[in-house]
Image: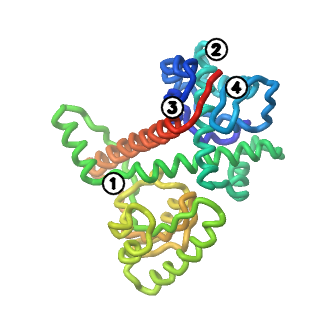
Amino acid sequence: MNFKPLILVAALTLAVGAHAAPKAKAGKARAAKAAAVSATTMPAVQSGVHLSDGIAAVVDNEVITHRQVEQAVAQARQTMPKGTQMDANELRQQVLAQMINQSLILQAGKRRNIQATDSEIEAVIAHNPSIKNPSAAVRQDIADSIIVEKVRQQAIMQNSRVSDSEVARYIEQAKQQGITLPEADPVRQYHAQHILIKADNDNAAVGAESTIRKIYSQARSGADFGGLARQYSQDSSAGNGGDLGWFADGMMVAPFEEAVHKLKPGQISAPVRTQFGWHIIKLNDVREAGTPEERQQNAVRQYLSQQKAQQATTNLLRELHSSSYVDVR
């Protein structure tokens, strides 16, 4: 299956935790070393499970068979850069570690009642011409990958924002240590506020949509947007009037960014649904970060945001490993 990768191997590589069997722990160093080899989405571990295939790992309520691992290894080899050399056992351990991580996140998503809608599945299929007449199993794999990405994005969204003070502090420390900071190309940046009503599944989304539309009506009638955010928003930015600060493309989820692109400064978006729930967005200003100082600040902000995103994924996996049963056989 070759639909668009949703999970980066490097982001999902984490040694099996305290609940793992000794065999799993022995592969820690090799799994970490192989982290950057490929960027591919592993098939859902539960699809087409046959116990006669032999169990490679038990992950809480799911099993991963040796057959599934070998299929995933073959897929990984197809996506590896030409000339890449890797020991077969090392690659297998890396692939299995990734499948375990995906299973843990997927099960966590299902426990939270996070779902993949038909429209989201169709969007993945539409953007991948190689998927033709997908079977039910392929659609399930796509749905599972969407759920995994939603869980990961929730963790990232909650922990990857970078404040102006963090950027200034990093730049100052770099100067003190004589480190040259990169200058980014001019980037369009947006200053916006938003109000979020959370909804992790379709049932919750119905009530959330009704609530956000009432808030939207108040905002369109002239009510103070910041005041509405403080009163109603369920995002961590609520205390600051929903202010998201300055951000560039690539820092927000796609539906959110698409809505921002359609706005002019001062305008408020119609309700927008993302994997986090329903939003309304107010665009305050747009700027081109064209001066050397602005480019530098933007480059540092993007770097720190990426670091926080990676750490958020690592923390998510560490938490799941510590609270789960994983037995590698």
Picture coordinates of residue 290, whole percent (x, y): 32, 53
User: Which residue is label 4 attached to?
Assistant: 69
The spot of residue 47 in percent (x, y) is: 76, 38
At 55% from the left and 56% from the top, the residue drawn is 254
- Crowd tier of the residue under label 1, counting other residues whose Cα lies within 10 Å: few below 14, some 14–19, many 20 or above: some
Which residue carries the number 3 mark?
10
Q: Tell me the mark number nearer the camera, choosing from 4 and 3.
A: 4
Q: Nearer the viewer, residue 273 or 180?
A: 273
Residues packed near mark 2 inside 10 Å, few (<14), some (14 to 19) or many (20 plus): few
Above or below, 88 against 14 in this view is above
Q: Which residue is mark 2?
A: 88
Residue tagged by mark 1?
289
Q: Residue at x 62, y 39 (%)?
A: 5
Q: Amino acid at mark 1?
A: Ala
Q: Quadrant of residue 141?
A: top right
Q: CA distance from mark 4 to mark 3?
A: 18 Å
